Image (cartoon, rainbow, N blue to C red):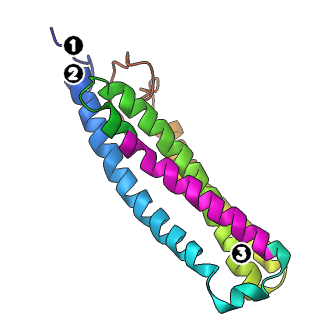
Amino acid sequence: MSETYSRGREETQEERADRQWSELLQELRVAQTGVQILFGFMLAVVFQERFADLVEADRNIYVVTVMLGAATAATLIGPVSYHRLLTGRRMKPQTVIWASRMTVLGLVLLFCTMCSTLLLILRVALHNQLALWLVGAMALWFLLCWFGFPLWAVAKGRSGPRVDDTDDGDDRGSDRA
């Protein structure tokens, strides 16, 4: 007998996992494209003639940025391999849970990568403390756009308990997103 959720969408656990996986893939496509472009740009920087003129601090920022970019790419591409290796094993709900967690971690790493990239570029462009202030302002903006506004929307728009797409699978309830 197939179990459906009592409120919201009438879908089985498998149907819900299929829908959530499809939605997650759409989100990952956007993030992966941006990360791959940024990472490719960062890899090319070291081969530019002006790279040799960077001070040690800027070279260190560059190395940290490249490592963060690599970690971000790995984390945001990870759900694809996770899904591929588990396909056919009747583990779609668990795959969605772990892929969702990896995606959130990827967003945190992307935040760090973007801030580090901005710091390097603005330090080279401005040669002064204004770079730190501008990066700080953009970091705040990223945090607001990626985490603050969604959390604010949750606080303002939800009257009931959270239906967690990443819990142990017993997530009967409406799907509010």
Q: Which residue is mark 1?
A: 3
7, 69: nearer the viewer: 69
Where residue 88 appears, as percent x and y from the top left, is: 23, 28
Q: Secondary structure at mark 2?
A: loop
Rendered position, 114 above or below 46: above
Closer to the chain start, of discs 3 and 1, is 1
- Placement of the C terminus among the 4 image quadrants: top left
Q: Which residue is mark 3?
A: 120
Residue lying furthest top: 1
Q: CA distance from mark 3 to mark 1?
A: 53 Å
Where residue 159 appears, as percent x and y from the top left, is: 45, 28
Q: Residue at x 81, y 85 (%)?
A: 127
Q: Mark 2: few, some, or many residues within 10 Å (few <14, many ≥20)?
A: some
Q: Nearer the viewer, mark 3 or mark 1?
A: 3
84, 165: nearer the viewer: 84
Q: Residue at x 53, y 68 (%)?
A: 39
Q: Mark 1: few, some, or many residues within 10 Å (few <14, many ≥20)?
A: few
Q: Find the magenta span and give its range.
A: 58-81
Magenta segment includes 108: no
Q: Is residue 47 visible?
A: yes
Closer to the chain start, of discs 3 and 2, is 2
Q: Is residue 137 visible?
A: no
Instruction: Label the magenta part by its dominant secondary structure.
Output: helix
Q: Nearer the viewer, mark 3 or mark 2?
A: 3
